[in-house]
């Protein structure tokens, strides 16, 4: 029961998927490519373009099959070819009559092609038998009946074949029987018919269609497989899918009778290689520079190099076909990934050297070779040569589709050739960017090149705009990338939002330089479009800047930034009523961080009442800090205590974590250093400042009860919830029972002044 096996496969596939821990970009999500197959026609090889899924099926771009073209030639091109295509795709044998509205059928009746009409009726009648009825016959109850009917029909077609004298129709009848014999599992009949009608015949499409079915027999060789792949566009994918495991390179080479067959053999052997393939590429070219597969292999090699070079260079991901999710032996850092990219640039130089020595005039189509040369010149950082080749190509081929992609490479060259610290977006680059403004990956790559050359403002403008385009226009063009503030860290967080990237990777001074250099009044077309995201998010970015200063515990700078923002921003964000991008019930202050705690009944009177916002919290921290540090102030213990409360509540366990983070998790399964890129990660998770200020409150306390409370809170900050409070038990054993719970905290706090 064949469907039973299929069900098992589906079940385990689903089970594996269900075990995933959540979304993590991989494969085509992360593969970085600029030189897309759509720019260079590789008709018939669409399924063999480089892809992270390795083997996948994509419909051929061919408009008409070889069979349709053959019948078009038969009619002397007197019938509209679309009618021939429609006949084979949509008509039943019952539609073949003199009243048919199909021009192909009308032509045959008009020209009294009764033998052809008889053949076409038979061909249409075979269609129900060219299947194993898997999907409609899960338990194979109809198989015996189907096989019996198919057997009878094969005998009928064989009889018609014997009566047919026209060689043209004889070969077509023979193919019908070969195909039926395949579904009837009669491999002996396939062998017999192929040898009688095709082995020594003209090697046209029908020959290779028949050879494809012959490849299922024991008499077929690896050379036969390679020849079907090379010469039959209609059977190319199937020949690889079914016979790739049977194929033997050495056997096929030994059987090859000429250089063209050797080229076909090398092409089949390398069409799905995911590693370096230059040796085979050279072999195909040397044996047959006009091989149909050569351009597809060339495009694959360029796309592989893009993945190997661009994916780690621009996104800090391993290339999309490297599957070592569970391999901890290699530490992935931004430095090691960049080194990996540089190593593959050396291989790109080898491929470039080969292409430089290719005689483009001998190839089937010089354009893919010239295009590949331009890609490789950019990959190997030969920017001036690349720009020269682009200029030459555009002059010679002004109407080619690939020119739009060359504009992208040109802009990348113009930026990449500039000195670090002096890179700028010239007017020429601006024009290209505006023209290519819907290509998210190009914009992102250009932004990264500017970042690498320390032009962070222009770089982030492009990255933020690419982020917007990738999400809103072409979901498949969405960009994912990784990073860490520490280049040697193996903890690379992934991003699909430029804001999250800024939050995790940039430090306060870097972000400040970016914001200081944004010209909010600039209105030229480039600024208006490409800077639109940064300008629209300007206040949100200032919020981020102030937050970064707060993470550094640089309260004066944080206050200056927050104070410079309009009060409306705080009113529209961080509250439970307004619904803005930062809110939806998530970015809210749950309680006052100085006086309240989550899951704890209030025990501290609110001495000052104010609307809680980042600005007001920092303002009061500065105010209370000044009062606490005043040696003449009799209430220093109080102010140190409420300052400690605030720092506690600004941690991952507090009610005001939004002071330090724009999103927060308490992941007990994550590595302790997972979020080390945040400069205050140790503080955020371990509440070190809270412990320090509770200790200062303890040292300045005037009553033992309040001292015990301060010590209790210091231990809570150190241990997290729950804590056994061992220090309280040791030093204040008489208060330990009360302070082990939250029910008596109020009286201990009020004891401060007694």
Image (cartoon, rainbow, N blue to C red):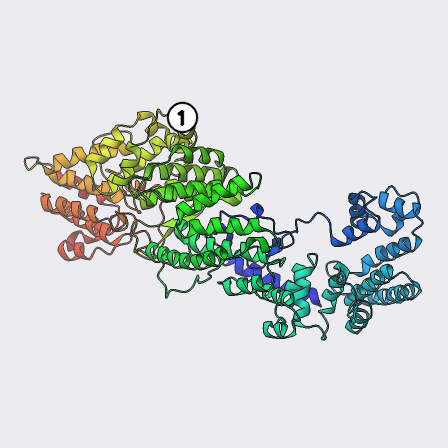
Under circle 1, the secondary element is loop
In the picture provided, is 520 more to the left or to the right than 403? left
Q: Is residue 15 visible?
A: yes
Q: Nearer the viewer, residue 455 or 330?
A: 455
In the picture provided, is 662 more to the left or to the right than 236? left
Query: Residue, x 86% and y 67% (percent of image)?
Result: 151
Quarter where residue 237 is shown: bottom right
Quarter where residue 135 is shown: bottom right
Quadrant of the rendering where the N terminus is positioned: bottom right
Crowding at dot 1, Cα within 10 Å, few <14 / some 14-19 / many 20+, comes out as few
Q: With respect to residue 444, does 720 lie above or below? A: below
Q: Nearer the viewer, residue 227 or 584?
A: 227
In the picture provided, is 440 more to the left or to the right than 540? right
The spot of residue 492 in percent (x, y) is 36, 53
Query: Residue, x 70% and y 59% (percent of image)?
Result: 232
The spot of residue 407 in percent (x, y) is 48, 40
Q: Which residue is mark 1?
A: 524
The spot of residue 121 in percent (x, y) is 88, 54
The spot of residue 307 in percent (x, y) is 46, 54
Quadrant of the rendering where the C terminus is positioned: top left
Seen from this angle, which residue lies furthest left?
A: 632
């Amino acid at each position: 029961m064949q469907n039973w096996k299929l069900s098992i496969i589906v079940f385990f596939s689903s089970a594996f998927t269900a075990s995933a821990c959540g979304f993590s970009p991989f494969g085509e999500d992360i593969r970085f490519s600029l030189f897309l197959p759509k720019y260079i026609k590789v008709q018939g090889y669409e399924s063999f373009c480089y892809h992270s899924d390795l083997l996948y099926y994509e419909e051929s771009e061919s408009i008409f099959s070889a069979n349709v073209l053959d019948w078009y030639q038969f009619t002397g091109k007197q019938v509209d070819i679309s009618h021939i295509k429609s006949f084979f795709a949509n008509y039943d044998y019952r539609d073949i009559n003199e009243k048919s509205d199909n021009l192909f059928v009308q032509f045959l009746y008009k020209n009294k092609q009764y033998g052809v009409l008889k053949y076409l009726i038979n061909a249409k009648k075979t269609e129900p038998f060219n299947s194993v009825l898997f999907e409609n016959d899960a338990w194979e109850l109809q198989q015996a009946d189907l096989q019996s009917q198919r057997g009878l029909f094969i005998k009928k077609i064989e009889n018609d074949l014997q009566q047919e004298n026209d060689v043209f129709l004889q070969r077509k009848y023979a193919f019908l029987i070969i195909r039926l014999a395949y579904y009837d599992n009669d491999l002996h009949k396939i062998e017999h018919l192929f040898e009688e009608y095709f082995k020594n015949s003209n090697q046209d499409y029908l020959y290779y269609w028949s050879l494809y079915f012959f490849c299922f027999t024991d008499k077929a060789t690896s050379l036969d497989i390679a020849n079907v792949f090379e010469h039959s566009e209609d059977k190319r994918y199937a020949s690889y899918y079914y016979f790739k495991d049977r194929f033997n390179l050495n056997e096929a080479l030994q059987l090859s009778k000429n250089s063209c067959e050797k080229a076909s053999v090398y092409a089949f052997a390398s069409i799905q290689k995911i590693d370096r393939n230059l040796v085979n590429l050279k072999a195909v070219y040397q044996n047959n520079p006009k091989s149909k597969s050569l351009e597809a292999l060339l495009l694959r090699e360029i796309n592989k190099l893009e993945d190997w070079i661009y994916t780690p260079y621009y996104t800090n991901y391993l290339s999309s076909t490297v599957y070592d999710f569970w391999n901890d032996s290699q530490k992935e850092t931004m430095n090691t990934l960049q080194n990996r990219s540089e190593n593959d640039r050396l291989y790109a130089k080898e491929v470039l050297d080969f292409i430089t020595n290719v005689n483009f005039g001998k190839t089937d189509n010089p354009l893919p070779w010239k295009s590949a040369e331009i890609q490789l010149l950019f990959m190997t950082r030969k920017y001036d040569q690349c720009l020269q080749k682009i200029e030459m190509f555009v002059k010679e081929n002004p109407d080619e589709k690939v020119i739009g992609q060359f504009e992208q490479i040109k802009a990348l060259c113009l930026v990449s050739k500039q000195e670090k610290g002096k890179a700028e977006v010239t007017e020429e680059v601006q024009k290209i960017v505006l023209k290519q403004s819907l290509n998210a990956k190009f914009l992102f790559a250009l932004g990264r090149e500017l970042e690498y050359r320390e032009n962070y403002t222009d770089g982030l403008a492009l990255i933020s705009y690419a982020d917007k385009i990738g999400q809103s226009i072409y979901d498949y063009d969405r960009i994912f990338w990784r990073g860490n503030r520490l280049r040697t860290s193996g903890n690379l967080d992934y991003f699909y939002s430029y804001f999250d990237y800024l939050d995790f990777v940039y430090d306060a001074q870097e972000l400040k330089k970016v914001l200081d250099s944004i010209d909010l009044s600039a209105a030229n077309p480039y600024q208006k479009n490409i800077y639109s995201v940064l300008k629209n998010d300007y206040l949100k970015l200032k919020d981020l800047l102030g937050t970064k200063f707060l993470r550094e515990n640089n309260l004066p700078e944080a206050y200056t930034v927050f104070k410079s923002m309009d009060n409306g921003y705080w009113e529209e964000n961080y509250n439970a009523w307004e619904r803005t991008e930062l809110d939806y019930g998530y970015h809210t202050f749950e309680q006052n961080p100085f006086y309240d705690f989550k899951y704890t009944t209030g025990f501290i009177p609110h001495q000052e009442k104010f609307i809680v916002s980042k600005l007001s919290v920092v303002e009061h921290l500065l105010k209370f800090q000044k009062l606490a540090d005043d040696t003449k102030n009799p209430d220093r213990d109080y102010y140190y205590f409420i300052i400690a409360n605030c720092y506690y509540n600004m941690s991952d366990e507090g009610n005001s974590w939004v002071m330090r983070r724009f999103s927060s998790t308490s992941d007990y399964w994550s590595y302790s250093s997972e979020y080390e890129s945040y400069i205050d990660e140790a503080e955020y998770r371990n509440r070190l400042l809270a412990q320090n200020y509770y200790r200062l409150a303890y040292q300045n306390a005037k009553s033992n009860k309040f001292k015990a409370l301060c010590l209790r809170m210091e231990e809570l900050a150190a241990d997290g919830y729950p804590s056994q409070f061992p220090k309280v038990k040791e030093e204040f054993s008489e208060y330990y029972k009360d302070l082990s719970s939250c029910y008596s905290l109020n009286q201990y706090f009020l004891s401060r002044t007694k």
